[in-house]
Amino acid sequence: MENKFCYKCGYIATSREHVPPICLFPEAKDVIGLNFRKDLITVPSCDEHNSKKSHDDEFLMVSISGIVGNNLIAYLQTQTKVDRAIRRKSKDFLNKEIIKNYKYHTLKSKTGKKYPVLYGNPNYNRLVNCFEHISYGIYFHEFGERFEGTIKMLLGFIIYNDKNTQTMTEMVKEKFIVDEISNEIKGENPTIFKYQFFEPDKFGLIGMVMTFYEGTEVFVAFQPKNSDEPFDLSLALLNSGIPTLIEVGDKIFEFNKK
Ligand SMILES: [Zn+2]
């Protein structure tokens, strides 16, 4: 039954879709002797929601593989598959589609090795859209049913211009770390992709963290269709602009700093 209908819209499924996209997992020719494509997750998909038809998979691959903090496999991926993808494109592909107003910088590791990195403004909405698709897919894979409701997310690798959003991201990270009732970390190729679900909170919100290349974190909150709108005092204070301190574990996060 569950394999006949699309993970995203519930229409008749015509194929299976990889979540996350298969291109994020290094090809055998780029990592001789290693296999990062063991037991990849697939979900049933209709024509429209199979992203093979769009350029989003490649966009996501180019956008996240080079993120600072990722592991060496991601670095290898940027030097091989991502590099080939960029070379196939026009000269302004990076600036137009991936990261606006970018500049090259060189980071030095503790051992003195130099890494070229790009700084700039990523295509945030398109990134969120990609991660949303993956979230729907992983939810389907985990629970065997389509998620209906609203998905909210924070991207752990972005430095938000808005101070409150940035503090919120840091707080969410901390909350995920100190939350004791969490499920096991899953993913057959954890150096490329792993995920973890958290028990629903008092509002029925289900938390999930997805980690790509051991350094790129995406925090997701699934709010089911019929659940109450989350409300608590700290959120109300936060939205009102009143300076607010919120304690998570042994850390304090300051919002609406004057
Ligand atoms: Zn669909």
Image (cartoon, rainbow, N blue to C red):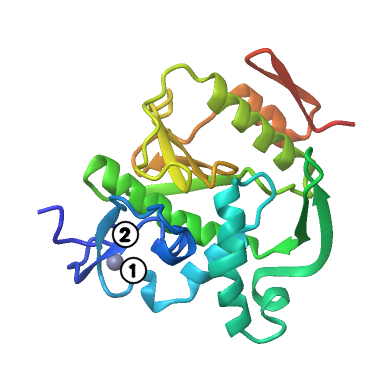
For residue 28, what is the image quadrant? Answer: bottom left
Q: Is residue 220 above or below residue 123?
A: above
Compare residues 251 and 147 and report the one nearer the observer: 251
Task: Specify few, some or many for label 2: CA neighbours under 10 Å numbering under 14, 14-19, or 20 or more.
Answer: many
Tell me the quadrant of ligand 1. Answer: bottom left
Residue 142 left/right relative to 179: left
Q: Earlier in the sequence, mark 2 or mark 1?
A: 2
What residue appears at the point 41 percent right and 19 percent down from the top-left corner?
181
What residue appears at the point 36 percent right and 36 percent down from the top-left corner?
186
Compare residues 249 and 224 and report the one nearer the observer: 249
- Which of the labelled discs sits on residue 49, or is there none? 1
Residue denoted by label 2: 8
Q: Is residue 35 above or below residue 180?
A: below
Q: Secondary structure at mark 2?
A: loop
Q: Position of residue 180 (x, y in %)?
A: 46, 16
For residue 60, what is the image quadrant? Answer: bottom right
Pointers 2 and 1 in contact (C-beta within 8 Å): yes
Q: Secondary structure at mark 1?
A: loop
In the rendered view of the protein, which quadrant contains the C terminus? Answer: top right
- As drawn, which residue projects farthest toward the top? 250
In the rendered view of the protein, which quadrant contains the N terminus? Answer: bottom left
- As drawn, which residue projects farthest toward the front? 33
User: What amino acid is at disc 2?
Assistant: Lys
Number of marks drawn = 2
Compare residues 230 and 92 and report the one nearer the observer: 92
Q: Specify whether tag 2 is near ligand 1 (CB below 8 Å).
A: yes
What separation in Å lies between label 2 and label 1 (alpha carbons)? 7 Å
Q: Position of residue 172 (x, y in %)?
A: 60, 32
User: What amino acid is at disc 1?
Assistant: His
